[in-house]
Amino acid sequence: MKKILFMLCCALLPLAASAEKVQLSTPNNTLVLDVWKGGEPKFVYYGAKLSADDFASLPAPTNANWSHLDIYPAYGATHTMSETAFAMRHADGNMSTQLLVEEYGITSVDEQAPNGKPRKGSLLTIKMKDPLYPTYVNLYYFAYSDVDMIECWTDITNGEKKTVALTQFYSSCMPIRRGNVWINHFHGSWAAEAQMVEEELNNGLLRIKNKDGLRNATTDRQEVMFSLDGKPQENTGSVIGAALMYSGNYDVIVDTDDTEYHYYFAGINPDNSEYYLKRGETFTTPRVAYTFSKEGLSGASRNFHRWARRYQVRNADRERMILLNSWEGVYFDINQKGMDQMMADIKSMGGELFVMDDGWFGDKYPRNKDTSSLGDWVVDTRKLPEGIEGLLRDAKKNGVKFGIWIEPEMTNTTSELYEKHPEWIIKAPQREPVKGRGGTQLVLDLSNPEVQEFVFGVVDNLLTKHPEIAYIKWDANAPVMNHGSQYLKEQSHLYIKYHEGLINVCKRIREKYPDVVIQDCASGGGRANYGLLPYFDEFWVSDNTDALQRIYMQWGTSFFFPAITIASHISAVPNHAVFRTTSMKFRCDVAMSGRLGMEIQPKNM
Ligand code: GLA
């Protein structure tokens, strides 16, 4: 009996006397966690900034062996029945992990944001370890000093002698108290991206995910908003906005179980991506950016736009050029005279930039349609006898800047690149590659450093030979259609290593070419995400340029992305995608709500 009493006392008493409420604040938001040495950190509060009195009146921290408010629940030791943020297989096969705090603290940070701008804020670091295994997980929360945004992420280090397997590795988790909570998320498809869905959160699991491999914003989007006071309102009500900042396969779930909370989890999609960590290696998850606003959906949007324009978009403090893009005007029918005429036409309409789209390259195999030549980034001199030099000369003569389209992550079975480097493509071992666009398109394996070098070289060659090029449209028109790297030993690392490779290349390009304007495009709006935007100035919203449908797509996109990133072009009528005729005034108004451009053949108008 005595023994039983003793055990009960132990279970109720805190493990350590030093339990602390830790708060982190931005100008108008506060996050509070309960943290103590030897316990699991717990969620207490996220919302409007707390006064000192409010903070003091929060309930005293209570330690418990298990809590449904653990902020980064790990699978297997205390958490098994609920959703978890983290799971792994230790080297001895044990599938349980417990993450207990070893140390924590807040430091001031003064560093460079990913878009190259300086940023300041406070960083809460919570260092956790498994009491039985040398598994170390650091949980980070960075609160900006001048914008209402808190970014959360983790890193995971294996201290075991042998390799361990990570099977679940969300970046962050956020409990949201039940009540009348609604979610806004953005579903889509090619030519109909970012269609807003607004629904009340109910019992059960809501999962938003992407498994495209490359274009993670074509279908569903990784950004969501939660309205805490009932049906979402534009200007009133408490709203939490959350944006995972990743360019690859992602997973966002909201679990509503039998507790009084909805649980939001976001991170890299673990499906077919078991990740092996060797001794001493560290795996860092992408960040989730959170904001809170009392001014409804639009308040949360303004917070995202402010943060994005300062820290997450390349050169967002610069005015954009009004441009003409050749795609819907001439498609693959590129020739020097035609380009010269389009340059003169955009100039005469007050524009500042001409962009030559697809169709300009290929020597042995000319790019006359979408079935060949990707990877052969040499000018087709049959179409452009004076090369890019001739085009730059014409641009100068016409008083406009010049831009160019590339799709550097891709090749076609009909290309000199593929003939030379069949080992560079993504394909399943022992199987014939599955082909995409045009029945011939293949994705290059960016997990391979040689491919990274090649992709960097595509941009580097263009810009070293032709420093006057002012704009690049970087396209990506294929998903990963078969699983396999001819480079990686660990096949399950393909998706994650691909995106690490892509970011490596983007960083190198921006170190060398900080100023050139680069658009990210992926079969339309497939890469509208904060994983890539720090390296890009803008993105193409959709291949559907019908002004009426664009209103819905641009509106959905504007929940999280500022107007300066939203490339929006006036196109011809009847519209090429949906055959609708709208007035010129209407088309201009819609295009002017983003970064204004044109996608027309002026001489036909
Ligand atoms: C993709 C892009 C278009 C255009 C074509 C060129 O579909 O989204 O804007 O660049 O490729 O092939």
Image: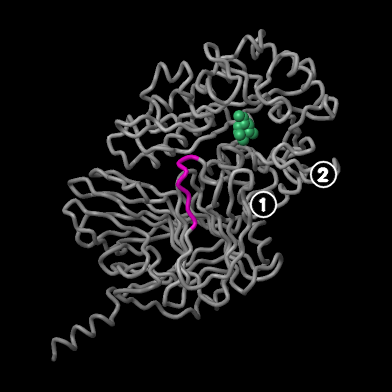
**Going 38% across and 47% down the picture, which residue do you hit?**
284
Callout 2 crowding tier (Cα within 10 Å): few <14, some 14–19, many ≥20: some
Q: Which residues are magenta?
A: 208-214
Tag 2: amino acid: Thr
Give the numbered dot on residue 111. Answer: none
Residue 519 seen in render:
no
> What is the magenta segment's predominant secondary structure?
loop
Q: Is mark 1 within 8 Å of ligand 1?
A: no
Measure the alpha-carbon separation of dots 2 and 1: 22 Å
Tag 1: amino acid: Ser
308 vs 26: above or below: above
Q: Which residue is mark 2?
A: 582
**Going 50% across and 52% down the picture, which residue do you hit?**
244
Residue 323 location, x and y as percent?
Answer: 74, 31
The one of 591 and 483 positioned closer to us in this rendering? 483
Residue 298 location, x and y as percent?
Answer: 68, 60
Quadrant of res 76: bottom left
Indicate whether residue 541 is drawn in magenta: no
Residue 198 seen in render:
yes
**Going 32% across and 62% down the picture, which residue do you hit?**
74
Q: Which residue is mark 1?
A: 558
Residue 153 location, x and y as percent?
Answer: 43, 54
Q: Nearer the viewer, mark 2 or mark 1?
A: 2
Quadrant of res 11: bottom left
> Residue most toward the bottom?
1
Quadrant of res 21: bottom left
The one of 522 and 372 positioned closer to us in this rendering? 372
Indicate whether residue 211 is drawn in magenta: yes
